[in-house]
């Protein structure tokens, strides 16, 4: 399936391969181009190497080695206009106010609702 004309180039970061596969399939089904990284440090390095390779960073919050908010801050240091969407099933330690302060544009909770995600991503194209 080729990407839609207004497809976002998304870097998806999740340390759990099964979750990454499911979210990737969902994003692709919505017409977007998706690149998956399971290691947040590798994702950070990729963004540093080519800050304009992606339109949007979709990252899990809870990952070993680097949290999603730390990845967001690092990515935004390389590219301040990058759209960052943080995703978590565990949001009790990281709230919407924290996300906004860190430059995160949206916060998605797991399980991800397809219709809500489609609507959210449509605001960025």
Image (cartoon, rainbow, N blue to C red):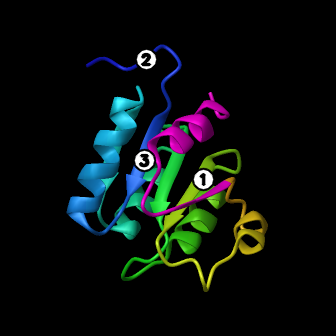
Q: Which residue is disc 2 drawn over?
A: 4
Q: Residue at 28% across / 60% down in the picture? A: 19
**Marks 2 and 1, the one that precedes in the sequence:** 2
Looking at the rendered structure, the secondary structure element under dot 3 is: strand
Q: Is residue 20 above or below residue 67?
A: above
Q: Residue at 21% across / 60% down in the picture? A: 18
- Across the whole image, how many numbered discs are drawn on residues? 3
Q: Residue at 22% across / 62% down in the picture? A: 17
Q: Is residue 115 above or below residue 39?
A: above
Label 3 to label 2: alpha-carbon separation = 17 Å
Q: Residue at 56% across / 43% down in the picture? A: 116
Foreground pick, 8 / 109: 109
Q: Is residue 20 left or right of residue 11?
A: left
Q: Position of residue 33 (x, y in %)?
A: 38, 32
Q: Which residue is disc 3 drawn over?
A: 11
Label 2 to label 1: alpha-carbon separation = 20 Å
Q: Residues within 10 Å of mark 2 (few under 14, many from 20)?
A: few
Q: Is the C-beta separation of discs 2 and 1 under 8 Å?
A: no
Q: Which residue is disc 1 drawn over?
A: 84
Residues in magenta, as a range: 106-125
Q: Is residue 123 above or below residue 100?
A: above
Nearer the observer: mark 3 or 2; the answer is 2
Q: Residues within 10 Å of mark 3 (few under 14, many from 20)?
A: many
Q: Position of residue 80 (x, y in %)?
A: 70, 51
Displayed quadrant of residue 26: top left
């Amino acid at each position: 399936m080729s990407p839609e004309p207004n497809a976002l180039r998304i870097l998806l970061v999740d340390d759990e391969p099964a979750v990454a596969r499911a979210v990737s399939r969902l994003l692709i089904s919505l017409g977007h181009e998706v690149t998956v990284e399971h290691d947040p440090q590798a994702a950070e390095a990729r963004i540093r190497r080519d800050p304009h390779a992606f339109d949007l960073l979709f990252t899990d919050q809870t990952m070993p080695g680097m949290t999603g908010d730390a990845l967001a801050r690092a990515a935004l240091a390389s590219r301040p206009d990058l759209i960052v969407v943080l995703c978590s099933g565990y949001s009790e330690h990281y709230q919407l106010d924290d996300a906004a302060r860190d430059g995160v544009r949206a916060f998605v909770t797991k399980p991800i609702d397809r219709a809500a995600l489609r609507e959210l991503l449509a605001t960025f194209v």
